[in-house]
């Protein structure tokens, strides 16, 4: 890959937030190009070996809820062979057992491709056992099963990736129409993670565009209704502390993102669709230096957040209606509003925005969502002893 060198990061305590990087070539050539030796170059070449070096240690978690099987199969076909896919499904088992259909398809696909995979149902007792035996009950409901929700599935995916011995974990939605875009996202993950100088790094994808049909023409929109609003308030949050207005944060709702495992285990998480915005809140609260935190190792090494713009347009299953969009706006803004370090003036502005969007009424606080503490609190050794890998596909950790 040939891609801009990340520079001019906004610093917030130990966090480095890099501006969006542009990709020049998705395939940067096989041989190392000496033209890039010049120290004043603004573009870098990331050789294939370096990408592969990340991908062999990278698990890709694919959250699924009642999506079309063909879409899921397309997503699988876009994931480079070296990566381990982890399909985390919350699909219905009644009246039709969709999970069984997914499992059969994934098994057949991976048998043909000779590929290792992990699959789990979010509400299965086998999955819940990891959290019971590991002493991390926060994710379990009154029935002792992993709670519903996308974030909850993602957390279970991180736990499985760590148990599987992976050093990195990425997320790709299962409703993507273009396997080529999925392939690009994973390549962006490995390119981004390979730039990290700290063991604590994250890559977030900014979509190039989202095609829509307007009249009878294709129109390539840049910003979704949710991300436009989320990014605006995230940047105001950051600007308050740095004292300089900024628009550096462009990926407040990035469903497609990847983390190094040490960072994935060190963040707090928020429920459902607030999870991606909350990454930033957790980073700023824990490593921003405003609140005291017991993380000398992370404060010393720093955290790097890379934002990279994809080249493929993003085409996924049609939006799930206005209610879903409004819920996502509320969830994204509510995690900012409820942050212990959210300035009072910004709270006021967020409340006004929520009223403007007719999401909350006057004098009503935004909904407070469930939060999950760091996954490093899970006793992985204890969980590993009782994990029955035959229940989760064809992957057996070495
Ligand atoms: N395991 C699991 N559990 N997966 C779920 C659940 C759940 O409870 N709910 C949804 N999913 C899966 C869906 O099947 C899909 O693959 C993915 O999670 C995203 O869900 P969508 O319902 O399609 O979300 P969206 O398209 O509105 O929003 C996506 O993009 C946003 C950025 O624009 C999500 O990735 C958001 O998190 C993201 O912010």
Image (spheres, rainbow, N blue to C red):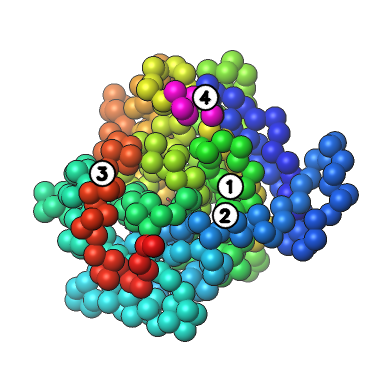
Mark 3 closeness class: few <14, some 14–19, many ≥20 residues within 10 Å: some
Mark 1 closeness class: few <14, some 14–19, many ≥20 residues within 10 Å: many
Mark-to-mark CA distance, 1 and 3: 26 Å
Q: Earlier in the sequence, mark 2 or mark 3?
A: 2
Closer to us: mark 2 or mark 1? 2
CB atoms at circles 1 and 4 under 8 Å apart? Answer: no
Instruction: Magenta stretch: give its range.
Output: 296-301
Mark 2 closeness class: few <14, some 14–19, many ≥20 residues within 10 Å: many
The residue that label 3 is drawn on is: 379
Give residue 101's position: percent from left, percent from top. 31, 79
The residue that label 1 is drawn on is: 193
Instruction: Using the image, determine if residue 168 lies above or below residue 351.
Output: below
Q: Earlier in the sequence, mark 1 or mark 4?
A: 1
CB atoms at circles 4 and 2 under 8 Å apart? Answer: no
Mark-to-mark CA distance, 4 and 3: 25 Å
Measuring 73% from the left and 62% from the top, which residue is drawn there?
Answer: 27
Q: Nearer the viewer, residue 117 or 211?
A: 117
Quarter occupied by residue 242: top right
59 left or right of 244 in image = left
The local secondary structure at tag 4 comes to helix
The local secondary structure at tag 2 comes to helix
CB atoms at circles 2 and 1 under 8 Å apart? Answer: yes
Ligand 1, seen in the image, is in the quarter at bottom left
Which image quarter holds the C terminus? bottom left
Measuring 27% from the left and 43% from the top, which residue is drawn there?
Answer: 378
CB atoms at circles 2 and 3 under 8 Å apart? Answer: no
The residue that label 4 is drawn on is: 300
The residue that label 2 is drawn on is: 54
Query: Which SS does the magenta portion mostly show?
Result: helix
Q: Nearer the viewer, residue 189 or 147?
A: 189
Q: Earlier in the sequence, mark 4 or mark 3?
A: 4
Closer to us: mark 1 or mark 4? 4
């Amino acid at each position: 890959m040939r891609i801009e060198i990340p520079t001019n990061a906004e610093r917030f305590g130990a966090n480095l937030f890099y501006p969006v990087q542009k990709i020049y070539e998705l395939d940067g050539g096989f041989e190392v190009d000496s033209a890039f030796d010049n120290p004043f170059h603004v573009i870098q070449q990331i050789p294939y070996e370096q990408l592969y070096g990340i991908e062999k240690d990278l698990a890709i978690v694919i959250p699924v809820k009642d999506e079309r099987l063909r879409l899921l199969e397309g997503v699988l076909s876009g994931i480079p062979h070296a990566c381990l896919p982890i399909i985390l499904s919350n699909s219905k088992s009644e009246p039709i057992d969709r999970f069984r259909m997914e499992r059969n398809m994934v098994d057949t696909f991976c048998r043909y491709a000779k590929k290792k995979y992990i699959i789990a149902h979010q509400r299965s007792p086998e999955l819940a056992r990891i959290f019971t035996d590991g002493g991390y009950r926060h994710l379990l409901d009154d029935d002792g099963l992993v709670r519903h929700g996308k974030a909850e599935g993602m957390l279970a995916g991180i736990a499985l990736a760590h148990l599987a011995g992976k050093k990195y974990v990425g997320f790709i939605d299962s409703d993507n129409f273009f396997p080529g875009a999925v392939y690009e996202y994973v390549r962006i993950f490995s390119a981004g993670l390979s730039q990290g100088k700290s063991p604590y790094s994250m890559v977030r994808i900014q979509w190039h565009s989202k095609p829509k049909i307007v009249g009878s023409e294709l129109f390539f929109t840049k910003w979704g209704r949710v991300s436009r609003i989320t990014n605006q308030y995230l940047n105001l949050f950051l600007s308050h502390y740095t004292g300089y207005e900024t628009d550096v944060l462009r990926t407040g709702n990035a469903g497609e993102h990847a983390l190094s495992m040490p960072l994935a285990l060190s963040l707090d998480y928020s429920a459902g669709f607030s999870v991606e915005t909350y990454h930033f809140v957790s980073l700023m609260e824990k490593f921003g230096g405003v609140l005291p935190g017991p993380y000398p190792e992370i404060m010393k090494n720093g955290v790097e957040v890379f934002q990279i713009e994809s080249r493929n347009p993003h085409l996924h299953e049609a939006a799930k209606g206005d209610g879903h969009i409004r819920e996502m706006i509320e969830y994204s803004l509510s995690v900012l509003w409820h942050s212990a370090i959210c300035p009072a003036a910004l709270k006021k502005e967020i409340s006004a925005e929520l009223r403007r969007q007719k999401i909350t009424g006057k004098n009503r606080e935004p909904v407070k969502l469930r939060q999950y503490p760091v996954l490093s609190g899970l006793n992985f050794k204890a969980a590993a002893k009782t994990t029955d890998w035959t229940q989760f596909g064809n992957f057996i950790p070495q």
